[in-house]
């Protein structure tokens, strides 16, 4: 495995390629465009991604731990595929933070996201399934078509979030905070018809 430690990578553009057998530790990626890459047997640890676009990557035997993302466009990323089952059960995450990021059509499956801050993110079309999201913040998020299924959303913050629609029966939502008018969508999910007086 070829190792890169503390290095910076800028304006790299790759599309439809395969990369394999690389270890990146405490590296910085800036203004990179990585589209439809197959990433095999690679590891990313403590890396930072700034102003990058990563679209529809396919991960095979790769791991990511504690990486930060700032002003990135991250679409079609299966974040749960970046942790083996043991690390996922221990509460590790591939990421530490998303600052001003777009996370469209991403997959978050079985992750421990308690108190995680997604505020302001575009999570359109993403999937949260079987996650621990107690006290997580989705404040100001775009959530059109985002799926929430069998999650613990106790105390989560959805104030200012838009276009969400999910089952109150299929998630734990005690103490979760919502704001009008968007909260009315939750009643629609229960089959309740709301009419103007």
Image (cartoon, grey):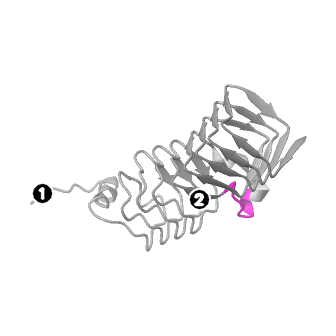
What range of the chain is rendered magenta? 88-95
Quadrant of the image occupied by residue 130? bottom right
Identify the residue shown where x is 53% and y is 57%.
150
The residue nearer to you, when weighing 10 against 15, is 10
- Count of picture labels: 2
**Kind of element beneath mark 2:** loop
Give the mark, 1 or 2, whose residue is nearer the N terminus.
2
Q: Which residue is mark 2?
A: 131
Count neighbours of disc 1 (C-alpha within 10 A) and say few if under 14, some if 14 to 19, many if 20 or more: few
The residue nearer to you, when weighing 155 against 48, is 48
Q: Is 96 covered by the magenta stretch?
A: no
Image quadrant where one finds the C terminus: bottom left
Q: Which residue is mark 1?
A: 196
The residue nearer to you, when weighing 83 against 74, is 74
Identify the residue shown where x is 54% and y is 69%.
134
Q: Main secondary structure of the magenta part?
A: loop
What percent of the width, then of the height, locates residue 61? 79, 41
Residue 147 is left or right of residue 36, and the answer is left
**Kind of element beneath mark 1:** loop
The residue nearer to you, when weighing 167 against 158, is 158
What percent of the width, then of the height, locates residue 176? 43, 70
Measured in 3D between alpha carbons, the distance from the residue under mark 1 to the one under mark 2, in whole angstroms, is 36 Å
Identify the residue shown where x is 47% and y is 58%.
170
Q: Residue at the far bottom: name it.
A: 175
Q: Is 92 covered by the magenta stretch?
A: yes
Identify the residue shown where x is 42% and y is 50%.
143
CB atoms of marks 1 and 2 within 8 Å: no
Q: Residue at the far right: name it.
A: 1
């Amino acid at each position: 495995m070829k190792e890169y430690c503390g290095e910076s990578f800028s304006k790299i553009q790759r599309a439809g390629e395969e990369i394999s057998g690389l270890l990146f530790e405490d590296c910085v990626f800036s203004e990179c465009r990585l589209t439809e890459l197959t990433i095999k047997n690679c590891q990313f640890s403590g890396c930072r991604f700034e102003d990058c676009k990563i679209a529809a990557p396919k991960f095979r035997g790769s791991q990511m731990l504690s990486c930060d993302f700032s002003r990135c466009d991250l679409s079609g990323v299966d974040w749960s595929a970046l942790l083996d089952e043991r690390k996922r059960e221990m509460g590790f995450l591939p990421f530490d933070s998303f600052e001003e990021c777009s996370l469209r059509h991403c997959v978050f499956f079985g992750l421990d996201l308690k108190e995680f801050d997604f505020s302001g993110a575009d999570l359109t079309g993403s999937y949260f399934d079987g996650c621990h999201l107690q006290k997580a913040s989705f404040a100001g998020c775009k959530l059109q078509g985002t799926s929430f299924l069998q999650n613990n959303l106790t105390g989560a913050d959805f104030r200012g979030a838009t276009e969400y629609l999910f089952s109150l029966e299929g998630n734990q939502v005690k103490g979760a905070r919502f704001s009008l008018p968007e909260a009315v969508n939750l009643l629609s999910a229960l089959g309740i018809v709301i009419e103007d007086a």
